[in-house]
Image: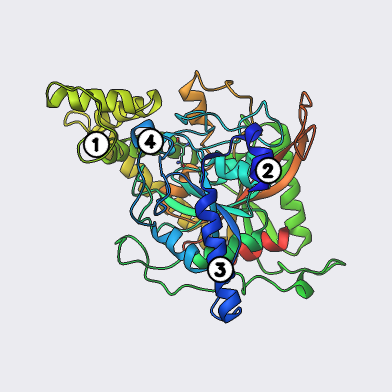
Amino acid sequence: LDAIGKADSAVCSFITVDAEQALAQARALDAHIASSGTDGLGPLTGVPLAIKDNICTQGTRTTAGSQILRDYVPPFDATAVARLRGAGAVFVGKTNMDEFGMGSSTENSSYKPTRNPWDPERVPGGSSGGSAAAVAARECAGALGSDTGGSIRQPAHFCGIVGLKPTYGRVSRYGLISYASSLDCIGPMTHTVEDAALLLNAIAGGDPHDATSSGRAAEDFAARLLPPEQLGGGGSRPLAGRRIGLVRETLGEGVEPAVEAAVRGAAAHLESLGAVVEEVSLPTFGLGLPAYYVLALSEASSNLSRYDGVRYGARAPGAADLASLYGGSRGGGLGGEVKRRILMGTYALSAGYYDAYYKRAQQVRTLVQSEMGSALERFDALLTPTAPGPAYRLGEKSADPLAMYKGDLMTVNVNLAGLPAIVLPAGYTPAPEPASGGPGHGQLPIGMQLIGRAFDEAGLLQLAHAYE
Ligand code: GLN
């Protein structure tokens, strides 16, 4: 809480800091230890975590970055939160985000922008920018984010931390405020790969409250990381036998040279650890982005219809009739980008255009899925950049939605295919104009993305951990 007090007036990671409930959780753990010792304590006892503000926390306001949920205090915990609570974690607060997860910079929050701890003039990425900044600024030990098209991974890249998007179905979505239900995933954002494995241990596993969660037995992901003696330097080759595909379509034109250099450098380092790295071509890769924006917005237009001021959401005062109650509540409660997306999604689903847009995008999704699936029969993991460039300046892309959407090119296919992917630091680039403050004065981090086979988080974490 002291660290948040020092850092957050500049970084603005949090929408809500709930000191009272964090201290109550911590005191309850202290009381347990005083009376019964450490018996029965969970593996995350006392670990301070931040939770993205679209994941429900019992008794703590949960806004999804929207004014329409400004007064919403959930009467229940999301399953992922309940499991972390059960493991002993302490929740310090709720992190800032693009409204309903719609954005890539956290500038679409209806509360405030968050700043990148490496350079306060730059964005932390999004939509989980508050969680990424909170971890990078050391305001918490780790955080939960959500990822519909890259929202865990791209901010991890912009802020120089580790972000894991699990396989679709690995973590229950119960209590996650929906953006696009067939794509949404909850996952950990941490300082290290081992921390990501420890958080995944706690949150993974089937849940009767989410019919799309997988009943696969939970694994101990942390225990399956290679032990230090197998990683030790001096020519040891811990990744011998692993095959990694470097995706050709994600390099070259449109990618900043510093990003390409970091990813190629990472490929060379993986080879030095014993892995075989080969280029692989995924010809449909570029089709994923338009298909994603049709599907995500279509699902969003349906999911967000519940915020009508009656069933859900703050009600506009003084409405004379039902239409003005709906219009006033939605018109005043939802932000510009959210309205744009509801309009586009509704259009794509409308009777005359369904076949041309929604159905076609579903067909592209199947193509992308099968192409990535067959590449992953030949490779243990695919390697790509996370985004075309490092963190950009606040305001640089906010007036041009299409430019912002294009930045999601390298992350959305993973969601279309439902695969797990991890982003971890791969290098740094000198910041063009050194800004003041932050841990890496004058530098910006660059993350690489490793995409794994469905439900092979263990293999993916092993790779990332050996690299790290
Ligand atoms: N930037 C993407 C979008 O705006 C992804 C967001 C997310 O993963 N929540 O849709």
Disc 2 residue: CB within 8 Å of ligand 1: no
Q: Which residue is mark 2?
A: 137
Res 277 seen here:
yes
Residue 305 circle label: 1
Q: Which residue is mark 3?
A: 29
Return the x and y of residue 294 as percentages of the image width and height: 34, 35
Query: For this view, does 422 lie left or right of residue 209?
Result: right
Residue in view at x 35 percent, y 42 percent: 72
Task: Please identify, in this view, whether the residue under mark 2 or under mark 4 is nearer the observer.
Answer: 4
Residue in view at x 24 percent, y 36 percent: 305
Query: For this view, does 254 lie left or right of residue 110?
Result: right
Amino acid carrying mark 1 in the image: Ser
Q: CA distance from mark 1 to mark 4?
A: 17 Å
Disc 3 residue: CB within 8 Å of ligand 1: no
Image quadrant in which the C terminus is located: bottom right
Q: Please name whichever residue, 415 or 174, is drawn nearer the observer in this view of the structure.
A: 174
Asked which secondary structure carries label 2, the reply is loop
Residue 81 circle label: none
Using the image, determine if residue 338 lies above or below residue 56: above
Q: CA distance from mark 2 to mark 4?
A: 26 Å
Q: Quadrant of residue 29?
A: bottom right
Q: Which residue is mark 4?
A: 70
Asked which secondary structure carries label 1, the reply is helix
Amino acid carrying mark 4 in the image: Arg
Using the image, determine if residue 290 lies above or below residue 79: above
User: How many residues crowd around disc 3 within 10 Å: few (fewer than 14), some, or many (20 or more)?
Assistant: many
Using the image, determine if residue 210 lies above or below residue 345: below
User: How many residues crowd around disc 4 within 10 Å: few (fewer than 14), some, or many (20 or more)?
Assistant: some
Q: CA distance from mark 3 to mark 2?
A: 26 Å
Q: Quadrant of residue 440?
A: top right
